[in-house]
Image (spheres, grey):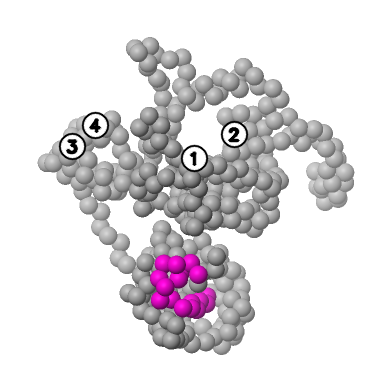
Amino acid sequence: MALRERLQAVEPAIADVEAEYVYFLDAREAPSEADRQKTDALLSVVPGILEPGGFHVTPRKGTISPWSSKATDIFQNCGLVCITRVERGIYYRMLAAEGRVLGIAEFRPALALLHDRMTEGVYTDISDLFAHPEPAPYRTVDILGGGEAALQEANRTMGLALSQDEVTYLLEAYRRIQRNPTDVELVMFGQVNSEHCRHKIFNAEWVIDGQRQDRTLFGMIRHTHATHPGNTLVAYKDNSGVMAGFEDVWFQVRRDGSQVYAFSKGQTDILMKVETHNHPTAIAPYPGAATGVGGEIRDECATGIGGKPKAGLSAFMVSNLRVPGYRMPWERDIAEFPERLATPLQIMLEGPIGGANFGNEFGRPQLCGIFKTFEDVHNGRYRGYHKPI
């Protein structure tokens, strides 16, 4: 379904929609005429004037998009040192049947179809896009006076996701040194002590019914490999796993300093890497999946004395898609979907493209993929992949 039809399904007053890319440049000084011509050539644009009555969709103010980072680097490398940042947005105008330009208030519910609320904003005034607000001063959390209640409130408002054990630990630690923590310290603790960084659950000791278990959850996985290593050469020791490969012939520069190319035989082993990027993809599917592929490629290149990425695959497990106009019988509205997360449909429309594009730009194709949806209530418990895998 075209964008116009999807907009009309939400707001019938919209008869037509106009959209065009616009580019914003932040310059430390006025560019010369030669710089202007070079800028137009790099962006493949013709300078023009926007028709009045529209609005911009750009990356959220105060943020720098991945597109901006790459484009700014290109500008700098092409000698446009006067340009400190380049950003891209879309300028929209919504038209009624009689040709009148509609105001945002007349189609506000339809704005959700035009931007990613996690990473983009809708603006009629774009003059402060490159504004640099003064950094906010750090603040302290009064746990000496407010006790656990103050720390729990900071935990909730700052989204630290601290467990009760961690709250108790912090309370005791700061009471011992007789001072209050700063918000910076709490955020830092929440990050470095997270499951992602420390595997405090996955690699923790388990006591079940008073019996200390022999292995951690991670140890159970390692034990499987230890008892059945097969042809695995490296596992749980480097940035990637490595299994025995084959003897191959390489056409490469000799190592005698002669700079002469020659054929040489050598062992070529095969490396494998799994990269999960669940939370970033749940927040912003395209860049989240893209940087997940980037992390995977980085780890492959950093294995041993260096690996060569060849090909990859993408796997997505999400809750029910609920495609508008194409609902499946099993897709029930069980509970409200978390507003802070991208919907499963958004993830599946944007995530695979983000991962494939990053691999393509690097030169490593995504050859295949896996896709699964699941959401159900069993014995009164609601299960699903709201946070995707």
Q: Which residues are magenta?
A: 5-21
- Residue closer to the observer: 365 or 258: 365
12 part of magenta stretch: yes
Could you tell which of marks 3 and 4 lies nearer the N-terminus?
3
In the image: residue 125, left or right of residue 228: left
Q: Residue at x 58, y 30 (%)?
A: 237
Outermost residue toward the top in this view: 211
In the image: residue 380, left or right of residue 59: left
Q: Which mark is residue 168?
A: 4
Q: Nearer the viewer, mark 4 or mark 1?
A: 1
The image quarter containing residue 94 is bottom left
Q: Amino acid at mark 2?
A: Asp
| Horizontal and vertical percent position of residue 359 | 64, 53
- Which residue is under mark 3? 148
In terms of secondary structure, where does tag 3 sit?
helix
Q: Which mark is residue 238?
A: 2
- Asked whether the viewer can see residue 160, the reply is yes
Q: Nearer the viewer, mark 4 or mark 2?
A: 4
Q: Amino acid at mark 4?
A: Thr
- Residue closer to the observer: 35 or 91: 91
The image quarter containing residue 202 is top left
Q: Is mark 4 in CB contact (under 8 Å) with mark 2?
A: no
Q: Residue at x 34, y 12 (%)?
A: 210
